[in-house]
Amino acid sequence: MNPSKMLLIRSGRLIDPESGRDEQADVLIRGGKIASVGKRIKKPEGTEVFDAKGLVVAPGLVDMHVHLREPGREDEETILSGVQAAVAGGFTAVACMPNTEPAIDTQETVRFVRQQAEGAPARVYPIGAVTRGRRGEELTEMADLTAAGAVAVSDDGCEVVNAGILRRALEYASMFDIPVISHCEDPMLSGTGVMHEGYLSTVLGLRGIPAVSEEIMVARDIRLAEFAGARLHIAHVSSAGSVDLIRMAKARGIRVTAEATPHHFTLTDEAVRGYDTNTKVNPPLRTAVDRQAIRDGLADGTIDCVASDHAPHSSEEKELEYDAAPFGMLGLETSLGLVLTELVATGVLSLTDAVARMSTNPRRILGLDGGVLRKGAPADLTIIDPKARWTVDRKAFRSRSRNTPFDGWELTGRAEATIVGGRIVFQRSPDKK
Amino acid sequence: MKLKSRHLLGLEEMSAEEIGLILETAESFKEILERPIKKVPALRGLTVANLFFEPSTRTRFSFELAEKRLSADTVSFSTASSSVKKGETLMDTVKNIEAMKIDQVVIRHSAPGAPHFLAANIGASVINAGDGAHEHPTQALLDLFTLRQKYGRLDGLRVVIVGDIAHSRVARSDIWGLKTMGASVAVCAPKTLLPLDVSQMGVDVFIDLDPAIEGADVINVLRLQRERQSQGLLPSPREYHRRYGVTLERLAGAKKGLTIMHPGPINRGLEITPEVADGPYSVILDQVLNGVAVRMAVLFLLSGGEGGIREEAEVRGEAGIQ
């Protein structure tokens, strides 16, 4: 962008968890960075003005768990279409999982992702695989991966079932100070399950995935991380038992962090009645008790971030019997709306805490720049209208896919504009200037 | 009186009044099955498609017979001979059927929710003939019919279902139907074959057969699939038979007038012995006969036929004119 281009964001409510700021102020952006923050900044000549009255100005939101289907399934999503969905959802950055075809398990594939992301409106941070081909047998060349730009490693989609391999992976990853992100699941316990194992699966006649499948691996991975002296991040926590284990581990000073998806703090297994395959996810939607435990965990900080696990799937693949459909639902374009409607409006989280879960914390965990509203910081900002009432319309999604169970939902709050490197890459109502 | 839904997907939501209507209508049709000319024109001009994605002999025959007795035009499709083998999806099969303007579809499928999928995507009425482990409503309805014929009521009966409850659609539909009609229901199985939280369905749970049999009016014996052993759910059929096999000896302490049921097909000597299956307590063959009448009732009511004595007289009258 033009190095001297200036943008003044005026009269917004600045929420910056890092500094504790929550007040009305202006932000002046120049050359892709924040030039100054203060009350009533005088508008320099030739500055574009964005009127943020009544809106919240936050450090750019980051979704640290998304599946961009490139390379391999560009029919479902490309890096570009995924990022377009992200900025429409208010995200200035995403971290993408390596379970593509081929997997992101070499420096070449990491570079490919970064290259494809070059023209995209938001930042894309690749997560490399823990093991080659995600087969759970041999470690990837993590020095190469991180040098090429990987910010973490994960075999997400699967657990690293062999504890011996995971132990070595944790030790090795710790040399580069990157977290190992675990998809906690024992495949022997999950079996061919397609939903949470409980009363609903009994009534619906569907095979279940018991909560204990996740919990025993959460317990196992935490102990291994402690033993290896490594950083562990638990992906998509879905059960109350897992939340308890993470809470206890943190109390003992173990370096574990965790994330939860909006669908896990919003829906329960009751949503599976009617067999809508958009409710089929792994880990599955569990009970009201689990949903509450996740909300409590987000409130008390046991769960550090909200991450959508955005998983696009083609209609042909989802329009099948429940047993046959693949797991996964979209998330980028509904995540912020659900956080605001289900957590902030209900008092579970303050706006500051919500911003912390969606911006400050994921950045800290992945070691990303920015995330503060301070002079010199990169100008990645999300402008939020916490009062906007809107109806989810999946036909209007920027994602290439349509697999969401939230179609038609009435939400309150969403991104009004997304600014990356000082450029407005997304704007809801163009007449705001 | 009419049924609330255009489809019959399960008994979980069906009211006692609706179940009563189906049973009464079935009684009229059963009477028709005693006549020399066993046909009525109730569904004449309508086309019913039988989609059996899972093998089935008796249920398919039963439905086909019911449809023909109602003068419907029937077309049947079973997986072996179908395009499913060529990789056609359920959705494609559905669209093809829709294009052919079928009025009613009877579907059996190994995937729970397959009938719901159909119902959401086609204009025809959908009847669930068994969807995985979810429900098999016409089986439960014929079970209810059979019991009501024998006891004159369902209210207050004590019914015990013995067998692989976890994988049984019959058990689930029976539980819903029986409880709605006021019966008291228990299940009996090894722990590995009981689905989680089954007691929340409102049933008593037994892992031993003898206490389950005590006080039971009816024992519904379910078929055990031998592959449960290779799935790690049971050590051996032998041990299953020892603990849960319904034999004459095990029935020694049972109530007078006990009824033995089985949805079929029977594994003689495994879950039930021939003496019991063919013995005086057994109503297994009545179940089969009643299946046709009950399915006629369901097809009739879902096609827009109204139940009740007045309608029955019309049906009789029309048949007389034939």
Image: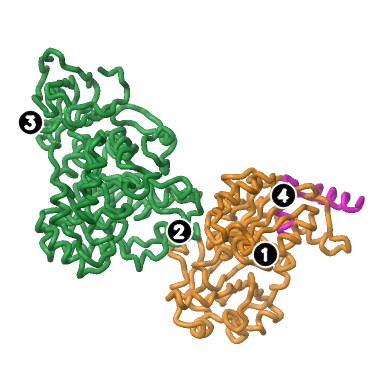
Chain colours: A green, B orange
Instruction: Give amino acid for label 3.
Output: Gly
Measured as percent of width and height from the top left, residue A89 is found at 30, 35
- Which residue is denoted by mark 4 in the rendering? B301
- Which residue is denoted by mark 1 in the rendering? B59
Q: Which mark is residue A201?
A: 2
Label 2 close to label 3 by CB (< 8 Å): no
- Judge by depth and name the residue closer to the eye, B163 or B36: B36
Instruction: Give amino acid for label 2.
Output: Ser
Instruction: For mark 1, name the chain.
Output: B
C-alpha span from label 2 to label 1:
25 Å
- Which residue is denoted by mark 3 in the rendering? A376
**Prevailing SS of the magenta stretch:** helix
Q: Residues within 10 Å of mark 4 (few under 14, many from 20)?
A: many
Q: Secondary structure at mark 4?
A: helix
Q: Give the residues drawn in magenta, as a range.
A: B294-322
Measured as percent of width and height from the top left, residue B246 is found at 59, 81
Q: Quadrant of the C terminus of chain A?
A: top left
C-alpha span from label 2 to label 3:
53 Å
Q: Choose mark 1 or mark 4, whichever is in front.
A: 1
Q: Residues within 10 Å of mark 2 (few under 14, many from 20)?
A: many
